[in-house]
Image (cartoon, helix red, strand yellow):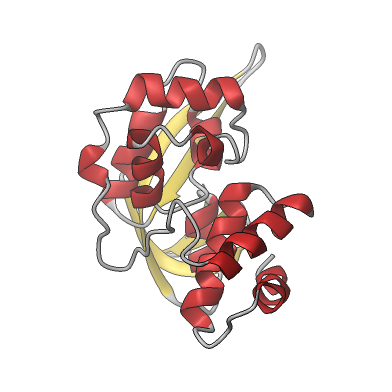
């Protein structure tokens, strides 16, 4: 089993990357939050990923699939997600659109509104996440070095208005919160909802 890769980043998109290890390129599927951070690195830089390997089967064949995470903590959280009924590896990977700490807090707080805005998570799956994992993810709530937690609620009235506008324009709440938090981090001088929305759309 492949449990970790260290090599050169050769390609990156919103769902996957290619890592060159000694001349052999591995195609690795990524959670949205990890893909976003890796995209900030220049091609050719060294990366290290904790990996999860499984066989995707259909009636005719079995396809080996490799998933990648920045640390063991992310991979452990992913494995917990796969324990939720009808939540396979692909669905669990897509749902990790926010930092682990934020997702764990949402589950512990039973924040169904945030959970159902995650990619591939509707009302019933949000309830299933809480039912299956509440009380099991408290250890993931703490933010670790290199991972910024996205607040479950906006930090100001202007941010709340900006999140509402983004949702009205079709941006899922989880993504809207992430973008607004990024604007606050990178542009702390911005104060109005209109400015926040304008900058948030640049992050799309």
Extreme right residue here?
A: 169
Extreme front residue here?
A: 157
User: Residue shown at 60%/54% (left/top)?
Assistant: 175
Left or right, 45 with respect to 29, comes to left
Question: Which image quarter holds the C terminus?
Answer: bottom right
Extreme top residue here?
A: 59
User: Residue shown at 64%/74% (left/top)?
Assistant: 196
Confirm whether residue 29 shows in the render: no
Nearest the viewer among 137 and 36 is 137
Left or right, 71 with respect to 173, comes to left
What is the quadrant of residue 103 in the picture?
A: top left
Question: Which image quarter holds the N terminus?
Answer: top left
User: Residue shown at 52%/49% (left/top)?
Assistant: 97
Extreme left residue here?
A: 139
What is the quadrant of residue 21 in the picture?
A: bottom left
Relative to 185, is 110 above or below? Answer: above
- Image location (x, y in percent) of residue 28: 51, 50
Nearest the viewer among 144 and 172 is 172
Relative to 185, is 58 above or below? Answer: above
- Image location (x, y in percent) of residue 39: 56, 69
């Amino acid at each position: 089993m492949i449990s970790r890769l260290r090599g050169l980043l050769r390609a990156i998109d919103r769902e996957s990357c290619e890592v060159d290890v000694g001349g052999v390129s591995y195609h690795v599927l990524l959670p949205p939050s990890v893909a976003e951070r890796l995209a900030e690195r220049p091609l050719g830089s060294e990366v290290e990923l904790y990996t999860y390997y499984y066989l995707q089967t259909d009636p005719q064949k079995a396809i080996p699939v490799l998933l990648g995470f920045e640390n063991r903590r992310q991979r452990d959280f992913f494995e917990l997600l796969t324990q939720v009924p009808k939540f396979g590896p692909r669905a669990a990977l897509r749902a990790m659109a926010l930092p682990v700490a934020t997702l764990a807090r949402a589950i512990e707080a039973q924040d169904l509104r945030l959970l159902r805005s995650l990619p591939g998570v509707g009302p019933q799956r949000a309830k299933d996440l809480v039912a299956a994992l509440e009380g099991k993810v408290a250890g993931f709530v703490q933010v670790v070095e290199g991972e910024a937690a996205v607040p479950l609620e906006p930090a100001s009235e202007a941010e709340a208005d900006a999140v509402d506008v983004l949702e009205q324009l079709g941006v899922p709440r989880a993504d809207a919160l992430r973008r607004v938090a990024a604007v606050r981090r990178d542009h702390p001088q911005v104060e109005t909802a209109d400015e926040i929305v304008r900058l948030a759309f640049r992050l799309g």
